Image: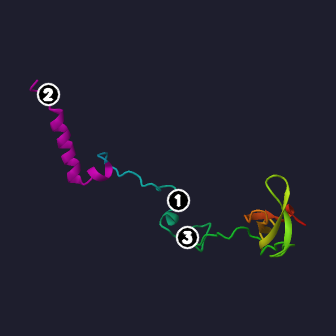
């Protein structure tokens, strides 16, 4: 058995070779560095933070639609107006408008119910009626 090489000594010799080449840490001993997380996912200029062909100025468009300023419907009811609002129990209760906003989904209101003083926000106009 003296003729058989010692596997532990062979492994140590291979590790020493890799360390002297400077490849052991970067390659895991395979001779080639592993790919980075985003290698091949982006064109070179995008991976480096430069502009891409689809966005030559390098700025992201976070503005939403390409339509010109949308016109929002004005709220029918005003702050301080006393109305009735639809409650969760499918009944209407007296309330006072405390805020009115124009939104993409139409006018939205915040109302204070007279019964308990609670405030409900994001009340759509169709859930309100004149008392």
The front one of 88 and 2 is: 88
Q: Is residue 7 magenta?
A: yes
Q: Residues within 10 Å of mark 1 (few under 14, many from 20)?
A: few
Main secondary structure of the magenta stretch:
helix
Q: Quadrant of residue 103?
A: bottom right
Q: Residue at x 18, y 42 (%)?
A: 12
Name the N-terminal-most of marks 1 and 2.
2
The residue sitting at 47% across, 66% down in the picture is: 48
Measure how far apart labels 2 and 3 are at the Cα level.
Answer: 60 Å
Q: Which residue is mark 3?
A: 51
Q: Please identify the quadrant where the N terminus is shown.
A: top left
Residue 43 in sight from this viewpoint: yes
Would you say the residues marked 2 and 3 are in contact, meaning their CB atoms lie under 8 Å apart? no
| Residue at the extreme top | 1
Q: Which residues are magenta?
A: 1-27
- Residue 116 is marked as none
User: What residue is drawn where x is 20% and y is 53%?
Assistant: 20
Pointer 1 residue: 42
- Work out whether 105 lies above or below 25: below
How many numbered marks, from 0 up? 3
Other-residue count near label 3 (Cα within 10 Å), few / some / many at <14 / 14–19 / ≥20: some
Q: Which residue is mark 2?
A: 4
């Amino acid at each position: 058995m003296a003729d058989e090489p010692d596997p532990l000594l062979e492994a140590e010799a291979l590790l020493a070779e890799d360390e002297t080449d400077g490849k052991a840490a970067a390659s895991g001993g395979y001779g080639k560095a592993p790919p980075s997380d985003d290698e091949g996912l982006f064109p070179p200029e995008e991976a480096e933070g430069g502009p891409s062909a689809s966005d030559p100025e390098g700025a992201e468009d976070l503005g939403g639609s390409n339509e010109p300023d949308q016109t929002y419907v004005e709220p029918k009811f005003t702050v301080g107006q006393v109305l009735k609002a639809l409650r969760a129990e499918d009944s209407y209760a007296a309330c006072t408008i405390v805020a009115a906003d124009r939104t993409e989904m139409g006018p939205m209101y915040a109302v204070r119910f007279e019964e308990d003083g609670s405030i409900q926000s994001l009340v759509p106009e169709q859930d309100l009626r004149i008392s």
